[in-house]
Image (spheres, rainbow, N blue to C red):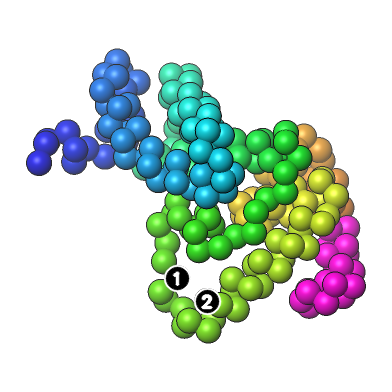
Amino acid sequence: MNKDSVKTDEQLVFEYVNGNNSSFDELLQRYNTKIFSYIFSVVNDRNQAEDLLQEIFYKVIVGLKEGKYTNLGCFKYWIMRITRNILIDYFRKNRILFSEPNKDNDLCMLYEESLTDKSHETQMIDVQLRADAVKLMNRLPERQREVVYMKFFEDKSFKEIAEQTKVSINTSLGRMHYAIINMRRMAKKYDILSI
């Protein structure tokens, strides 16, 4: 086994920032397939997935060179956040609704989390509830949908949501309030689920 292959992400980042380009190549090898697979499962277009992957790694390079990566020990989560943000921008720019989550395209692929801790029945209920919630979310106006997505799928605080969307915290809270009202109304109308 090559000595370099056991280096941590943080060691490779440090080496890359200090001029060792081959260290970035190793980071690229570690994350390229996983991120591409995730993107492809979401956008369902190989060429678009390749373009988005290039954009992600470009942002990673720029971020590293500009010193934006400061979360030592969390490179995997940093690159996943970049991936999510680029996908959100892609969906927003192309006015595409987020696809329904499933075991093949959910964010858990990137986190490498397993659902094995839950019974099969509980897993099925969770998947169905999440899919139903996404159906409702996709019917919301864009600004409300964005707040719901950031809060429940990205686990952001209202302060973080306000900063990212460039509105006040109260505006974010208001959008969430109206989103929940609208989702309840739609759930009842379409007999989807009880919220």
In percent of the image, x 40 and y 45: which residue is there? 34
Whether residues under marks 2 and 1 lie with C-beta atoms below 8 angstroms apart, the answer is yes
The residue tagged 2 is 123
Mark toward the start of the polypeptide (2 vs 1): 1
Residue type (three-letter) at the residue carrying disc 1: Leu
Tell me: 112 left or right of 87: left
Residue 82, how many percent across, how many down?
A: 53, 36
Which corner quadrant of the image does residue 61 belong to?
Answer: top left
Rendered-image quadrant of the N terminus: top left
Residue 49, how many percent across, how many down?
A: 52, 37
Residue 59, how many percent across, how many down?
A: 51, 26
In percent of the image, x 82 and y 45: which residue is there? 143
Residue type (three-letter) at the residue carrying disc 2: Gln
Regarding residue 170, the answer to whether it shows in the image is: no
- The magenta segment: 177-195
Residue 195, how many percent across, how many down?
A: 78, 74
The residue tagged 1 is 115
Rendered view: 110 above or below 24: below
Q: Nearer the viewer, residue 157 or 115?
A: 115
Rendered view: 112 above or below 90: below
